[in-house]
Image (cartoon, rainbow, N blue to C red):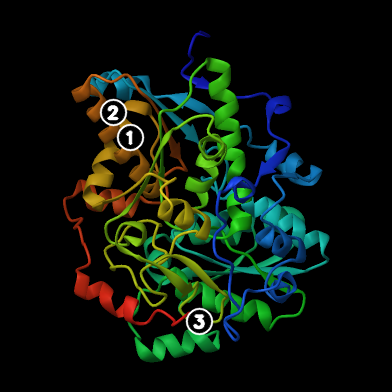
Amino acid sequence: MTKIPHRLILTEDQMPKQWYNLRADMKEQPDPLLNPATLKPIKTEELYPIFCEELAKQETDCTTRYFDIPEPVLDLYKAYRPSPLCRAYNLEKYLDTPAHIYYKFEGSNTSGSHKLNSAVAQAYYAKEQGLTSLTTETGAGQWGTALAEACSYFGLDLDVFMVKGSYNQKPYRKAVMQTFGANVVASPSDTTRVGRAILANDPDTTGSLGCAISEAIEKATTTPGCRYVLGSVLNQVLLHQSIIGLESKAAMEIIGEYPDVVIGCAGGGSNLGGLIAPFMQDKLLGKANPHFIAVEPASCPSLTRGRYAYDFCDTGKVTPLARMYTLGSGFIPSANHAGGLRYHGMSPILSKLFHDGYLDEARSVEQTKVFEAASLFARLETILPAPESSHAIRGAIDEAIRCREAGEKKVILFGLTGTGYFDMTAYTSYLEHTMSDYIPTDEDLQPGFDSLPKVD
């Protein structure tokens, strides 16, 4: 076996030149998107008023296994990719576990997260189509920052609708987006019809990704030369993020390891879907049987407590309907919720895999336990992790402890999606013992379930 380094970075020549489309190998396809007006399966061309045409084609393509990564996208990828695969030796020693713990670190770029992988692709396709501007939403700010960086590179204007709770918690995220030329608006806002309606109903709302999506889509569809782009949930996003898993698998092959357990944090599904993609392919094709774990916040538990049903992807109910695990499009996370992972639904691809038993397990974790894991990891591994990533760290620690107690020498791989340097308000709250946990009751969740659209 090759000597296992603390970190392994593939060469540029070893970086994948194609994205992998997981749907091509799924035994059963996710249910199709539905037109909100007719409740019939949506046609690719019906997505053109919202998405770039090439992205709309990627969204509905269930058969093409690999997509070539365009050269201009590869050129920008090379500024920060391949990203390192790291062995958490210090964490292993601290936990006294026989497990080998690896993490794929996606924070080595200005946006500080994995989000740039899809942002670059989506901005490129918009530029190729001749568009002049884009709109989007952002929760914790990683996606907005990544897209601002990508739009600046390709010469596109950008409007970002940032969830108001995060907008107020993270002023420096806003400053970074503005540095790259983006216009940043706290959502819900009075700049759109849907935003004004939401504020009229609840003037003090802290917002949600569903609210921000509604505003971004309205802005895109009423602005010439503009389209909407999304940083998670969609099939096209998981396609672009597959580069995370493809690099991980290639690096692990070099060092002679293969993961028994693959763990990712789960909000809308972008990083989890990207990380597991080639390993899930092995499972679907009967080549291996890794155990997949999704870790989500207890305050926004779409996989662990949501319903598998058709739902709108936004609060304003203007998007296509997707069949996914959902808390209802009107769900608003608790105001004490720190970080991202605040979307009401889960990627249709991951939802289908979970429903069919291929995505083995979903766990929900309180945020004080998440920040406990984050602080421990920072002290031992010298990286300050994002709150989102720290859900995966919590899962990896728990699995490593289980391996110690069972005497099992397993290989654990988790996704470290980014850094937490813009999350110091949350870290301070944890360190000063003012952070509280919130777990919605069944009664809290019921209104969202009652509002699910009636689809035969």
Tell me the residue that label 1 is attached to.
396
Q: Is residue 117 something that shows in the picture?
A: no
Which quadrant of the figure has residue 129?
Answer: bottom right
Residue type, mark 2 in image: Ala
- Residue ID at (60%, 43%): 242
Q: Would residue 411 appear left or right of 437 to someone viewing this image? A: right
**Figure check: 261 above or below 448:** above
Residue 44 appears at what percent x and percent y? Answer: 72, 69
Residue designated by label 3: 317
Q: Distance between the residues labelled 3 and 1?
A: 37 Å
Q: Position of residue 293 (x, y in %)?
A: 37, 42
Which mark is on residue 212? Answer: none
Q: Give the residue displayed 32% in from the left and 62% down from the top.
A: 300
Instruction: Sort mark 1 into few (<14), some (14-19) or many (20+) by Cα contacts within 10 Å.
Output: many
Amino acid at dot 3: Lys
Amino acid marked by disc 1? Ala
Front-most of residues 231 and 179? 231
Toward which corner of the image does residue 304 lie, by quadrant? Answer: bottom left
- Check whether the beta carbons of the residues at disc 1 and disc 2 lie within 8 A of each other: yes
Q: Can residue 9 be seen in this view?
A: yes
* Residue tagged 2: 400
- Mark 3 → mark 2, Cα distance in angstroms: 42 Å
Q: In the image, is residue 212 above or below residue 232? A: below
Q: Residue at x 21, y 62 (%)?
A: 439
Q: In this view, does 190 lie to the left or right of 82?
A: left
Q: How crowded is mark 2: few (under 14 residues within 10 Å), some or many (20 or more)?
A: many
Q: Which of marks 3 and 1 is nearer the N terminus?
A: 3
Left or right of 434? Residue 252 is right
